[in-house]
Image: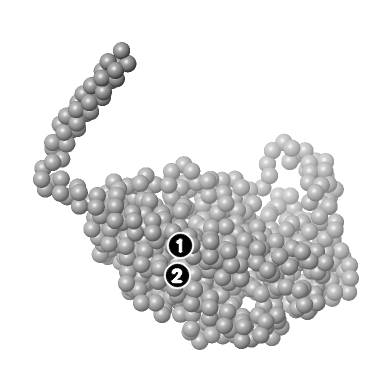
Amino acid sequence: MRFIRPLGAMLILSLLVGLPGGTLAVAEEGYKLPQPASQEKLNELYDNDTLKKWFEEYVGLEKGSGPWMDFYKPPAMHMYWMPTRHYVKPDGTYYDQLLQKYKANECVKCHEEVTPGLVRDWRESTHAHPKKNDYFATKTKDIEKRLNQELEEVDCSWCHGKDHKELHMPASQHCGQCHVQQVNEWLSEKDYGRPNHPQTTEANVIVPWYPELYRMGIGQLQFGCDYCHAASEKCDICHTRHAFRAAEGRKPEACMSCHMGYDHPDAESYGESKMGYIYHMEGHEWDFEKPLSEVVPGETYRTPTCQFCHMYSVDGKYTHNTVSKGIWRMGTVPPKGVEFKSSLKDYPYGVNLPPLNYKLDVYSPESKKKREKWIEVCSNCHSPRWGRLYLENLDDVMFQVWGLQDRAQKVIEDVIAAGALDPGPEERDPFPLGDVVADALGPGLLGEPVFNAIKQTKGKLPVLGPILGVYGVFYPGKYNPSKIERWYTDMWFGDKAFLYKGTAHVQQDISWWYGSSKIFEKISYIESEARHLMRAKDTDKFLKEKGRFKSMPSLGVILAGLAGMVFGTAVLMRRKKQQ
């Protein structure tokens, strides 16, 4: 147990250290981005050579991404989801025939045959008509000045390249050549730590269970993780291609296709709230063509949308940074202010590696500033006092549920300390990449105790709680995790998310029936199962001490014989009675 407590934190920290961010720069080998004429430039996400090699350097489909890139080859669909790293140009007879039939500047004509739906979207888009009204004409004029080029139409070549030999799939850095402010605001999310959108691909592939599933031959079952986390490279998660309507990106549905379900039930909690129902009933009449800064609460929108609240910055200004007001950060990092009894009291276990080398402080000066911004948003519809009291209520909810998480973790830690976990670590499949992670990272990153523990056990040791304890919902190892560990993961990662989001979005049933009530249920499961495991351990110990294990087979034969005799006698007596 001595090495179990720090393992989860140290392992994930080792993977994340040095990942503060920098920028996507090259779409594909040989492709050069156009340079704006003005001094305004696109910021970088990856300003670290290691990170560039892990996430930005073009490798096609020969390698994966992140520190485990050599452990797996990505499926072909990754070239659309992570194009800067994995896109492969079309090849084959059909493609060659199209190149012979259409000239390089006949993109639209060709694609009316190949992908007519996309062409229709584009024809109705602002890209096809960049000066369709005074508002967009002004915006376009600013872009023209920056690029030192007149724009009558933004056609396929602007996003995909002008030469068939250098075709590429666009990502955020391509959008940023014209939409510098928007992309820079989006990139700035990394400055607020995880979770954020630009670094979601990193969070997806750096965890050890990701390559482990590929080693097990079932990596493509992670389809949902890959498709959703591709948001790190592209703007079309919210502004769907090829219309790219700003109005579409202002509607709650733009967020809901990703923000739903087990670990971030925003769609359910907002959509079923009173705010969501007003939107469903009346939203079709609202003017989503208006920029958020021009929205008049109660007039333009009668109730807030996801974007209205989460993209609000300060003083009536809005930004493409949606995490700048985040305080609880999905509720997965232990907070200060809770008297933990489990090993959570030692989190982050003395490790001094960013970005997870701290307990969350929801009352820090920075968090207090964020809270004032939230109150400013809430005050569009409620009184400032109401907003302040509601946020304090949300804090109390989170502190209390962390107390329950501590209680559950202490129960399981006691089971592990007693050697009562069944099956025990030595009988289970190891922790993901447990057989290689020590050699891959070394004692310098893992520290000598953890490094030696992993080397000695080859990863056959239990890992609980933040952050790597969540591996149980991503890993189908044999006997790993056990039932009690999986219940615990569901409680703190899944059920707590419903409690948090349901409370934050004022949806009472999500908060209670899918949150608090489920957490109470898991607590009872965990404590009952722990009692059974402890009794089983004591029983095994008693039988071993009395030497009863050796006689168990013979005793079983005797009991089976007696049972057979009793059954046979009963049958004979019944037949005599019938005669």
Which mark sits nearer the N-terminus, 2 or 1? Answer: 2
* Residue depicted at 61% across the width and 70% down the height: 505
Q: Quadrant of residue 123?
A: bottom right
| Residue indicated by mark 1 | 519
* Residue depicted at 68% across the width and 55% down the height: 169
Q: Position of residue 443 (x, y in %)?
A: 31, 63
Q: Amino acid at mark 2?
A: Val
Q: Amino acid at mark 1?
A: Ile
- Residue 553 to residue 496: above or below: above
Q: Which mark is residue 439?
A: none
Q: Position of residue 259 (x, y in %)?
A: 61, 61
Say which of 239 and 409 sits in front: 409
- Pick the quarter of the image with the C terminus: top left
- Residue 442 visible in the displayed image: no
Q: Report the number of numbered marks.
A: 2
Q: Position of residue 149 (x, y in %)?
A: 82, 70
* Residue depicted at 66% across the width and 63% down the height: 271
- Residue 403 to residue 536: above or below: below
| Residue indicated by mark 2 | 401
Q: Quadrant of residue 490?
A: bottom left
Q: Are marks 2 and 1 in contact (CB under 8 Å)?
A: yes
- Residue 114 to residue 166: above or below: above
* Residue depicted at 22% across the width and 26% down the height: 566
